[in-house]
Image (cartoon, helix red, strand yellow):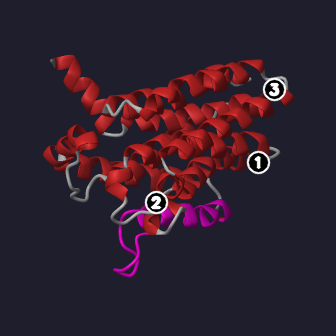
Amino acid sequence: MQLKKIIEFIVFSNVWIALGAIGIALSTYFYTESEVDLLVIMLVFFSTLFGYSLQNISQREIHNHRSNQILWSQSNNKLIKGIVFVSFLISVFLSFYIMNIYLIILSIPSFGLVFFYRNAFSNKIQIRNIPFFKILIISFCWSWTCCAVPQLVSNSIFNWNITFITFIYVFAITIPFDIRDMAIDKKKIYTIPQFTGAGVAFIISQLSILCLFFFALFHSNHLLCFFMIMTNLVLIPSLKIKSEFYYLFVLDGLLVIFPIFVS
């Protein structure tokens, strides 16, 4: 029982997804053969923790496929607010400490997308409600935070390959979440599965990973090829499995182990 509570805390408090962000950041360093900057790793972790925890502050309707997560968030609302406050302060401090003013300015749009993702802009528009925009926001923010920032901080030559890989990969593994949430989103959010249907959306997800497989094969990155095959196999149960831990622990866990397969 105690172990279950620990796992719930790690997953539902967004620590797990923040570790996934570290995984992508480490993958960026490994892929570009750059020295790992621990301060940047900390920035990636706390900015991701802030972004995801911020979305959990607002009260949400309880749904069958996300009841445990939402109930946990509601029961630990003060804790989540504390995580948001602390992670925001640490993120701001680290940003001004390790980033120059130009990079901070370039990062403002990403912060704005995170802040207004669920919070209404001008009391009317939630950015995530713009048709098909939700998945693009998520993919862009992950690519910027975990790939672009680590490279730009070190002033090394910018590698578009790992940024492209991350954008497409996050895009692909986000689609199953949208398939799961079709019944929830149909009232206000227009996603790819709602436009194409669950089956076609799943194929798009699989084809996206397949494209990354051939991209890795073209660059003779055989470990990454294996990881893409493994990802497609892990994605297959998403058409039937609705368990929260499958999505929040297993699928998001792919990001955590990503660095093992990048060279």
Q: Earlier in the sequence, mark 3 or mark 2?
A: 2
Provide residue 56's location: percent of width, then percent of height. 29, 52
Q: What kind of element bears circle 3?
A: helix
The amino acid type, in three-letter code, at marker 1 is: Asn
Q: What residue type is labelled 2?
A: Val
How many residues crowd mark 3 within 10 Å: few (<14), some (14–19), many (20+)? some
Viewer-nearest of discs 1 and 3: 3
Other residues around mark 2 within 10 Å, as few (<14) / some (14–19) / many (≥20): many
Instruction: Name the spot of residue 31 as percent of width and height, x first.
Output: 74, 31
**113 vs 245: above or below:** below
- Secondary structure under tag 2 reads helix
Name the amino acid, label 3.
Answer: Leu
The dot on residue 155 is 1
Question: Magenta segment range?
Answer: 102-126
Q: Mark 3 points at which residue?
A: 217
- Quote the CA–CA distance across marks 1 and 3: 28 Å
Secondary structure of the residue carrying numbered label 1 = loop
Quadrant of the image containing the N terminus: top left
